Image (cartoon, helix red, strand yellow):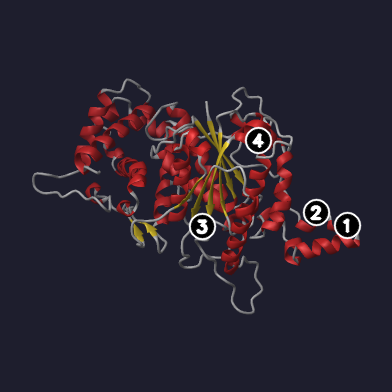
Amino acid sequence: MAKLFVFGIGGTGSRVIRSLVMLMAAGVKIQNCDKIVPIIIDPDTQNGDMNRTVELLKTYKQIHDKLGRRDEGFFHTDISTLSSIAGDGSSKIRDSFVYDFGGINKPFKDHVGYNQLDIDSQALVDLLFTKENLSNSLDVGFRGSPNVGSVVLNEIIESPEMRFFASNFQAGDRIFFVSSIFGGTGAAGFPLLLKNFKDSRIGLPNAASLNSALTGAMVVLPYFSLEQPAAGVEADFIDSNTFTTKAKDALSYYQHHLNGINAVYYMGDTPDKPLENNPGRASQKNDAHLVELLSALAIVDFMDYTDNDLISNEVYHEFGLREDVDQVQFTHLDQETRDRIAKQLIRFHYFERYYTQHVPDDAQAAYARGVDLMGAIRNEPIFKELDKFLKHPDYGYQSWLRELGRKERTFAALNVSESDFNRMVADKQIETGFLNKGIHQGSFVKELNRASESISDRDAFRATIQAFEVATDKLVEEKLKYA
């Protein structure tokens, strides 16, 4: 069973994985692998972006595990923690989607043992790092300083987590990195991990398989800016004016030192209104961004390539819209991207809207009576997990979609506040009249009832999800007629 290991490095890595999970929930297919294993690497253990992604992953996993292994449909892709991939319960590492840094909470100065160095060595360190670098605490990440990150992250190669990862890496597995190029953790972590995985002399288990593994990367260029402190105010902040310079420096380094990679994707955008400047911890929780959603599609694209395609040619990609617009709809995406995600996202959106708005009124409908759906919703914990995935105010689908609509360049393909199913898809609305009501509660119930007749599984959760998969597919094809 081939696995895809996705290393989400830093805050951008976490945010892209959040969008990837939404695509997987909608049923977007990942080819050439049976399991995705996200590994989030961020020393800021309180990072708001990271922690809500972790909670989303946990919720997704519970829903997927309840539904069981399937080849298609909502939540069908297996997303697993690193510790679970051995399959025999022998793992001694923490069962988490996050790399365990062991709670480092000391200044970088103490981490490198600055005070124990001789004068000449201290002078060298002073040349390489600023006073702020040396005094900053590592428990909030590397604050846009990849030189600091490269020192700390270099130590994780010999960690139990990395040795467990390497021990369970098999021929046919693939690796994908997601990181920004203009910060600290991502800019340092991606090239460092790549260098070590591709060095057969490093001493990791299965070094030959790692060295030859098909590897891709999403390199995220600057796409947001941060507020600057008022004049004369001493503040702990990251200077986003340096993002472009850092990106250019990193690209120059990548040009000459990035070896062993099969596919590289680049994504960025002109920053819009500056975000609140939160260097780390729980306050670093940015709204979802279109760039992150499109970056997640790079993972889908990478897995579409066959082994022979990637072995014979290195591929490089940038992403462009069909039109330079601020409100991006499905028609503004290229046809290949639309084919990959449009119908799946529309179907999932219909499911979410109907499930949260109308299912409580359907107690007497055949599809609900057959499995005592209302009783199951009240009593079975898995329905609480589904509610969290769809409606949680911090990380759920509804909040993710709303966040995507708050930027100057928004993802406006689905009308998040629209209750009329005929008006929910921005680029394809259903014309209604006296004889044609389009999609409404009655038509939904009709399709759900019809779908439930062919479902033999009497488990309320599985039967309900299957019924919605069939019903939404029918409605999109026959009522919306989306092409």
Circle 4 sits in a helix, a strand or a loop, which is it? loop
Mark 2 Cα shell of 10 Å, populated few (<14), some (14-19), many (≥20): some
Mark 4 Cα shell of 10 Å, populated few (<14), some (14-19), many (≥20): some
Q: Earlier in the sequence, mark 3 or mark 2?
A: 2
Dividing the picture into quadrants, the one containing residue 165 is top right
Q: Amino acid at mark 4?
A: Arg
Q: What is the residue that sits farthest to the left in this orientation?
A: 434
Cα distance in 3D space between marks 1 and 3: 39 Å
Q: Earlier in the sequence, mark 1 or mark 3?
A: 1
Dividing the picture into quadrants, the one containing residue 122 is bottom right
- Residue 286 got which mark? 3
Mark 1 Cα shell of 10 Å, populated few (<14), some (14-19), many (≥20): few
Pointer 2 with pointer 1, Cβ within 8 A: yes
Circle 2 sits in a helix, a strand or a loop, which is it? loop
Q: Earlier in the sequence, mark 2 or mark 4?
A: 4
Q: Which residue is mark 2?
A: 112
Q: Earlier in the sequence, mark 4 or mark 1?
A: 4
Q: Which residue is mark 1?
A: 117
